[in-house]
């Protein structure tokens, strides 16, 4: 980790230049939030998207100064938690533009009945040029169901919060959303393999099934998410989702859990089933947390899954030498602060611990994450043998830290007031 960086926002200038005052880890929680968000904003483009990182491939490896659709949707989550809904809506409208651009792939995929293959003509690419929005590569698996699940879930959520994420082309966009529903249902999202969030496979992934189930459930409007909203918007009148698909998805997810897939008994991405989707039961959430905290949490982050070869320190002996991802620590922090807030808001019994203990745990994971961020407050993609790779910061990791810091601050403040 580069320990030479310091905060431009917290310097004083003397006759001979800047005098360093405070490193990121020594700032107040509020100032940490501001600085971390500033770094995220540096990755935001004029069209509302976020490049994955500034790394352009000059030192080997894939360039990350491009758009990943999933990364954009997670990266813009930070805007919601600081109240910048206009920026979040702009990001989701960009995703809508990209879907419109490649709509023929969605309608083509909707004509199929089985797994589409890694780079079939009917598959929306997950990585595009940040200016032209043209597809970049056919070299690896683009059939990733969670992209559509996250998009459906969050657009429905924003509409229920009275935000006009569907822009002036409302009729055409609603037709496209129906095409996405048809695409997912005819390609049997609940039983056929995909490449998942980590773009590896193909396998049937619990995280993929759960994301689509969450998206369908949001639009089906069967009261699963009703407690989250002050005003109930009947989304099912705009985009009907048959109950049959909810039932099939739920049965498939329950059958696969607590495993992520046939080859992975647990995986960091299963945290998404708890947040943002909240699509698993309290008992299932507890099992997912137990598996990840017992088997995948390390000092420098969270291992994605046992034996992960990506940036592995010893591919010939992969188990125990996996890269660790700091954003997993931020994700765990979010989940524990969310659990505490739910108990305080609803008065429900604590399945795991009382709110004070949950907030303490959230803060503990935040401290672990901050300890491995750069001195100026950036979240690296991963560490191998205690060294970060090129992608510093990684956009959606930076966003998850902002969400974690803001939500933990809010949860602690509420607890102190009670």
Image (tube, rainbow, N blue to C red):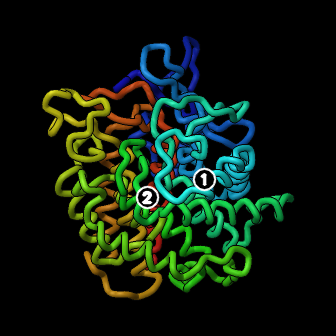
Q: In the rendered image, which quarter is residue 272 located in?
A: bottom left
Q: Is 295 displayed left or right of 8 in the figure? A: left
User: In the displayed image of the protein, which residue is found farthest to the top?
Assistant: 16
Residue 208 is marked as: 2
Kindly identify the residue that appears in the image at 47 percent across and 41 percent down: 118
Looking at this view, is 38 or 12 the one in front? 38
State the SS at label 2.
helix
Q: Relative to residue 33, is residue 154 drawn left or right?
A: right
Nearest to the eye among marks 2 and 1: give it.
1
Residue 240 at what x, y percent from top left?
Answer: 66, 77
- Residue 103 spot, x, y in % from top left: 71, 49
- Quadrant housing the C terminus: bottom left
Residue 68 in view, yes or no: yes
Coordinates of residue 398 in the picture (x, y in percent):
49, 43
Quarter of the image with the N terminus is top left
- Is 382 left or right of 341, judged from the image as shown? left
The answer to whether residue 32 is visible is no
Q: Residue furthest right?
A: 168
Q: Which residue is tagged 1?
A: 109
* Distance Cα–Cα, label 2 vs label 1: 17 Å
């Amino acid at each position: 980790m580069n320990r030479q960086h310091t905060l431009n926002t917290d310097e004083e200038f003397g006759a001979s230049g800047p005098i360093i005052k405070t490193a990121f880890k020594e700032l107040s929680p509020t100032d940490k939030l501001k600085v971390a968000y500033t770094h995220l904003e540096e990755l935001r483009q004029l069209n509302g998207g976020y490049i994955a990182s500034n790394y352009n491939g000059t030192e080997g490896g894939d360039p990350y100064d491009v758009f990943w659709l999933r990364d954009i949707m997670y990266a813009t989550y930070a805007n919601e938690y600081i109240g910048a809904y206009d920026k979040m809506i702009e990001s989701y409208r960009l995703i809508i533009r990209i879907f419109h651009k490649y709509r023929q792939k969605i309608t083509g995929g909707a004509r199929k009945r089985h797994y589409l293959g890694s780079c079939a003509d009917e598959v929306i690419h997950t990585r595009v040029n940040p200016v032209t929005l043209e597809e970049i590569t056919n070299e690896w698996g683009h059939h990733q169901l969670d992209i559509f699940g996250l998009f459906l879930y969050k657009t429905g959520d924003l509409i229920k919060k009275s935000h006009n994420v569907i822009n002036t082309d409302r009729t055409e966009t609603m037709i496209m959303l129906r095409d996405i529903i048809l695409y997912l249902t005819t390609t049997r999202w609940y039983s056929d393999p995909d490449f998942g969030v980590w773009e590896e496979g193909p396998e049937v992934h619990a995280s993929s099934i759960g994301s689509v189930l969450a998206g369908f459930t949001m639009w089906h409007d069967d009261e699963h998410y009703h407690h989250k909203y002050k005003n109930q918007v009947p989304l099912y009148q705009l985009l009907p989702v048959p109950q049959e698909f909810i039932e099939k998805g739920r049965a498939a997810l329950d059958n696969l859990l607590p495993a992520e897939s046939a080859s992975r008994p647990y995986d960091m991405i299963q945290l998404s089933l708890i947040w943002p989707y909240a699509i698993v039961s309290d008992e299932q959430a507890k099992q997912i947390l137990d598996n990840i905290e017992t088997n995948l949490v390390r000092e420098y982050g969270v291992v994605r899954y046992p034996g992960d070869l990506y940036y592995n320190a010893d591919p010939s002996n992969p188990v125990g030498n996996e890269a660790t991802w700091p954003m997993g620590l931020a994700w765990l922090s979010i989940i524990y602060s969310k659990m505490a807030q739910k108990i305080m808001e609803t008065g429900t019994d604590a399945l795991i611990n009382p709110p004070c203990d949950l907030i303490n745990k959230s803060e503990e994971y935040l401290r672990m994450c901050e300890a491995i961020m750069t001195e100026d407050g950036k979240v690296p993609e991963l560490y191998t043998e205690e060294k970060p790779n090129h992608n510093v910061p990684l956009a959606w990791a930076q966003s998850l830290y902002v969400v974690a810091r803001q939500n933990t601050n809010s949860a602690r403040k509420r607890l102190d007031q009670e």
